[in-house]
Image (tube, grey):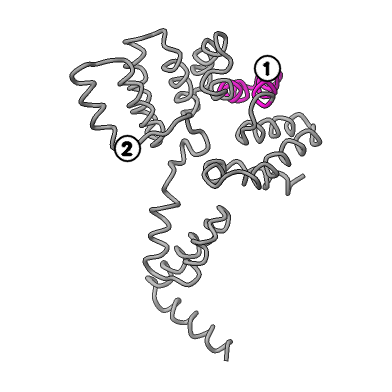
C-alpha cells in the first residue's frame, strides 16, 4: 500500500515539471531550516505546501544579506531611517548623518552604497574613529583587506576596545586575510581574552588548524558550542552562522 502511494506521488511529480520544481524548492528550504535549527519552520515545511516554503524563503532565508551575515556592526539599525537621514543630509550635510546612513547600508549588505556614504562622512570628519573603523569593516567585507588594515590599525592603536572589540576583531580578520599569521594570532588572542564572541573563537580555531594545532582549535570550538547552549534566544539567532561553523569543524576533527 505504502509502495503504491509512493509510486503514485513520484509519478505525479515526474509528470508535472511545475510540481517537481515546487517539491525541490520545498526540500531546499527544509534542509536549510534543519541546518539553521529553525524547528518551528521545519514542522511547517513538513506539513505545509505551496506558500510555506515561499514564506520561509522571504522571512528567514533572505532575512540577512549574505555579504555581511555574521559580520554585523554593534548596534541596531532600522531601514525606515534611510529617508529621514537622506533628508537630514540634504539640509544639514553632517558627517554623523552620512555615517548612520552608511551603517544601515552595511547591515543591508549594500556595501558599495555603504562605502560611498562612509567616504562622504570621512570627507567631513577625517578624525572620527567610528567613521574610519566602519569604513575599514566595509572594505574588509569587500575583500579589500590591504585597504582596510591601516584604517583599523589607526583606530585600535588609540583604543583597542573601540566598538566593544569589533574593530580589533576586524583587524584580526584583515591580518588573517593578508597572511600575517603571527600578527593575526596575537590579535585574535587579544580579542578572545576580553570577549567571548563566537566569530572570534571560530576564526581563531581556523587559524590554529592552518598552523597544524588541532588541540587549541578543538578547545576554542567547544567553548563556542557550550556557550551557545546557555545564550539567550536573540544571541543564538545572531551567532547561528558561527555556531554552525564551529559544529562543522568539530565533526572534522
> Which residue is drawn at the image coordinates 65% and 32% (left, top)?
196
Q: Secondary structure at mark 1?
A: helix
Q: Position of residue 112 (x, y in %)?
A: 36, 28
Q: Residues within 10 Å of mark 1 (few under 14, many from 20)?
A: few
Residue 240 counted in the magenta span: no
Q: Considering only vertical position in the picture, is 205 above or below 47?
A: above
Residue 118 placement: quadrant:
top left
23 and 34: which is toward the camera? 34
38 and 23: which is toward the camera? 38
> Which residue is drawn at the image coordinates 45% and 30% (left, top)?
75
> Which residue is drawn at the image coordinates 73% and 45% (left, top)?
250
Q: Considering only vertical position in the picture, is 144 above or below 56?
A: above
The chief SS type of the magenta part is: helix
Residue 132 placement: quadrant:
top left
Q: Which residues are magenta?
A: 170-192
Query: Disc 2 marks which residue?
Result: 79
Residue 191 counted in the magenta span: yes
Query: Disc 1 marks which residue?
Result: 183
Q: Position of residue 40 (x, y in %)?
A: 51, 61
Q: Considering only vertical position in the picture, is 149 above or below 74?
A: above
Q: Give the quarter of the figure containing the N terminus.
A: bottom right
- The disc, 2 or 1, on the residue closer to the chain's N-terminal end is 2
Amino acid at each position: 500500500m505504502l509502495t503504491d502511494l509512493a509510486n503514485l506521488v513520484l509519478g505525479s511529480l515526474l509528470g508535472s515539471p511545475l510540481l517537481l520544481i515546487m517539491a525541490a524548492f520545498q526540500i531546499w528550504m527544509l534542509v536549510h531550516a534543519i541546518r539553521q535549527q529553525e524547528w518551528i519552520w521545519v514542522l511547517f515545511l513538513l506539513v505545509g505546501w505551496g506558500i510555506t516554503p515561499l514564506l520561509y524563503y522571504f522571512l528567514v532565508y533572505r532575512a540577512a544579506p549574505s555579504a555581511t551575515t555574521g559580520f554585523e556592526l554593534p548596534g541596531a539599525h532600522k531601514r525606515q531611517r534611510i529617508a529621514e537621514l537622506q533628508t537630514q543630509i540634504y539640509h544639514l550635510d553632517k558627517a554623523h548623518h552620512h555615517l548612520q546612513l552608511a551603517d544601515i547600508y552595511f547591515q543591508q549588505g549594500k556595501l558599495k552604497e555603504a562605502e560611498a556614504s562612509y567616504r562622504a562622512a570621512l570627507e567631513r570628519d577625517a578624525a572620527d574613529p567610528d567613521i574610519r573603523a566602519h569604513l575599514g569593516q566595509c572594505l574588509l567585507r569587500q575583500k579589500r583587506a590591504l585597504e582596510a588594515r591601516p584604517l583599523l590599525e589607526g583606530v585600535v592603536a588609540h583604543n583597542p576596545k573601540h566598538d566593544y572589540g569589533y574593530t580589533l576583531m576586524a583587524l584580526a580578520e584583515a591580518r588573517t586575510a593578508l597572511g600575517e599569521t603571527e600578527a593575526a594570532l596575537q590579535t585574535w588572542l587579544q580579542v578572545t581574552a576580553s570577549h567571548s564572541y563566537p566569530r572570534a573563537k571560530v576564526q581563531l580555531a581556523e587559524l590554529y588548524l592552518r598552523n597544524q594545532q588541532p588541540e587549541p582549535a578543538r578547545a576554542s570550538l567547544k567553548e563556542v558550542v557550550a556557550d551557545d547552549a546557555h545564550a539567550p534566544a536573540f544571541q543564538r539567532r545572531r551567532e547561528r552562522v558561527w555556531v554552525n561553523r564551529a559544529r562543522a569543524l568539530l565533526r572534522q576533527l
